Amino acid sequence: MSVRTVPETVAPPVVGERPILVALAGQPNVGKSTLFNLLTGLHQHVGNWPGKTVERKEGHFTFNGASYRLVDLPGTYSLTANSPEELIAREFILRERPDVVVAVVDAATLERSLYLVAELLPLPAPVIVALNMMDVARQEGIQIEPEVLQAALGVPVVPMSATHGVGVPELLETVERMARGELPYTPRLPQIRPDHREVLETLEERIAGYVPEPYPREWVALKLLEGDTEVTQMMRAALPPERWEEVHAVLRAHDDAQVAVASGRYEWIGRMVRAAVTRPRLGQIGLTERLDRWATHPVWGLVILASILGLVFWLTYTVGAPLQGWLEKGIGALAEGVRGLLTGAPAWLSGLLADGVIGGAGAVLTFLPILVIFFAAMAFLEDVGYMARAAYVMDGLMHLIGLHGKSFLPLFLGFGCNVPAILGTRVIESRRARLLTILLAPLVPCTARMAVIVFLAPAFFGPAAPLVSWGLVLLSLGVLALTGIVLNRVLFRGRRSAFIMELPLYHLPNWRTIGLSVWQRSLSFVRKAGTVILAVSVVIWALSTLPGGSAGESYLVRLGKFLEPAGRLMGLDWRLTVALLSSFVAKENSIATLGVLFRAGEEGLAGMLAATYPPATALAFLVVQVLFIPCVATVAAIRQETASWRWTLFSVGLLLVISLLAGMVVFQVGAWVAKGV
Amino acid sequence: MSGKPAPLSPDSVPLSALRAGEVGIIAALSGGHNLRSRMLTLGLTPGAEVTVLQNYGRGPMIVRVRDARVALGRGEAEKVLVRRRAE
């Protein structure tokens, strides 16, 4: 049982026909993405695993004339059904039976990263260990002899350093020979701790004959002992009831077996590495621990985090905003050009193309500079290893709203733009915490909303504008905290996912990894969100021009007038209501819409608004504007990341209710105060 | 089945009680099935040696286990019982 060869079900691949299927497995922070990017370059496709919100990366490459299909499995610490990622990784290996599984391990944390290998070996696909970060391990004073490790494991071990491209040809050669069946493959499998060996055998015996394809029986028995929820459910369905009762009784009597299984794996790892690793380190303190004295300090850590985030904002404003301005101008000129070309065509056609299509596509494009900067900042901080530190120092504060540290950065990104905030929630493993973060993210006032405030607050409130703007930001954050507390209680009954995570070693950034990450994320945003935004823009354009062609009598205006009674509760007339509705396409639209409805340029508009609306109305409008339904790009991102229309609608409904309630309270109180004065 | 307290032994203390620089040997884990599973996976198995790298008495803490640095919330660290190792 401890020696196994490649199962016969894996047909030897025929070079030149079906591409050789290679799965890339590894724990987080072991350099798996770097290796994936190195091998596939731009020949990669990023999507989602079917029915899941987990990123699926696949690519292809050729080596020695043969073509390879490389599937990047999600980075997971183990293959126990703790998360969708772990389930995806093991189901892929069990069902797709890759020709070779390349398990990337970090030489600097060898024991811990071999844990995944201990879980991979019992699965029916041959494993090659890519011993990555050999250079980092050497710096940390750890010496590893790959041949000794290979002899102990009984599977090929290839030393390498993906960041420097060292060892990659050797790895590919090993993959090729393994796929052709030219390499001996005699893995030594981990064993459960001796005190549980008997119960494992009993279980195997009890389930024999009932295990569904393609699951190996010993593996299923082990997963049952580990208390794996998926496998337990599967076997409860597969076994006859009385047999299940027997199995269940055995499991109940051994509910401590989880520890025995995991300890067994670590004892096996201990035996594997004992001869291969020498560590003459004598209390030497590495760079990471020296940096962490500052970066994770409860006070200095926050100061450093604040400075880094300040820098990100500074970059956004000095680089992103002008680019955004140029793009807007360029798109405006393009729209004019199209209008000019279509002077002979019917007005609706030029309007549809110039305002609807180009205007809509333009709205997507103008997001890009800010998105690219934020994606780059995120990828950079993640790649050098800082992201985990930011989560660590913010953990205490995030606890107050039912979240933990990992939700902080995505939420913070929301100040720039809510879209990267929502896409950024991918760093949160727990689905519950991720969902809560997605629901809260639109309450962070983004730059577009701030732009509206910055324009309207001085118009309405003159010298008090800075105070009003500051109050509006505080109000948003207060509402965010309150909503977090309430949602956590109501939806999730106060359950909080555990905060336990690895703090990876700091290392120099890999520009290729960062560049590809920015490229893929931007592309995926333009593709997925772009289509939704374009469609909604065209619809809003149609509503604002049809049926007469003049903005004054359009469906949108009729809708605004129809909704006016509701708006009145917040002191809003139909024009402000229409402005609010149009902000759904892009927040800054409300100013443009008011400009059209008042037939005034931006300069004249401020004065006209101040003359038209009393302070209570003005304040109510600003409050609703800040808390209102997120823009269509954000809604599209919410749909993309939750993969659920139900949660998307819930989010929209939630914000609608919150903003309208807040608007009403502010207007009624404001009007009452004004009467008293 | 889950959440039952780890067996208390007079000489074991929660990991959260160790100061920075102290070393402990893990005696037992309490907490729910999922939390225990995540801790075990990250190498916090009974018998493993943990060095506390940072503990300010409140908020999360950092330990080194099996050459890796692991951050734990205080609540999570309280569920790991360790025996202090004399230096």
Image: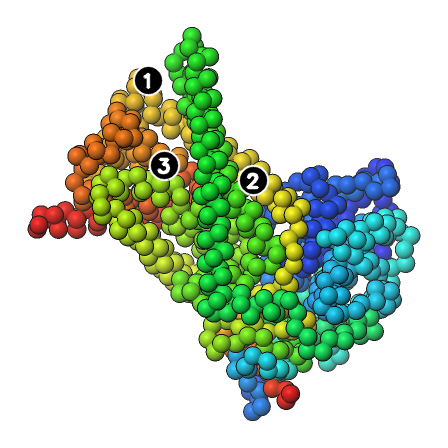
Q: Which mark is on residue A588?
A: 3
The answer to whether residue A626 is visible is: yes
Secondary structure beneath dot 2 equals helix
- Same chain under badges 3 and 1? The reply is yes
Q: Amino acid at mark 1?
A: Gly
Point out residue A491 in the picture as x, y percentages from the top left corner. 41, 58
Secondary structure beneath dot 1 equals loop
Chain containing the residue with disc 1:
A
* Cα–Cα gap, marks 3 and 2: 22 Å
First in sequence, mark 3 or 2: give its number: 2
Q: Which mark is on residue A522?
A: 2
Chain containing the residue with disc 3:
A
- Same chain under badges 1 and 2? The reply is yes
The answer to whether residue A75 is visible is: no
Point out residue A425 in the picture as x, y percentages from the top left corner. 51, 52
Secondary structure beneath dot 3 equals loop
Q: Is residue A652 above or below residue A478?
A: above
First in sequence, mark 3 or 1: give its number: 1
Q: Is residue B47 above or below residue A380?
A: below
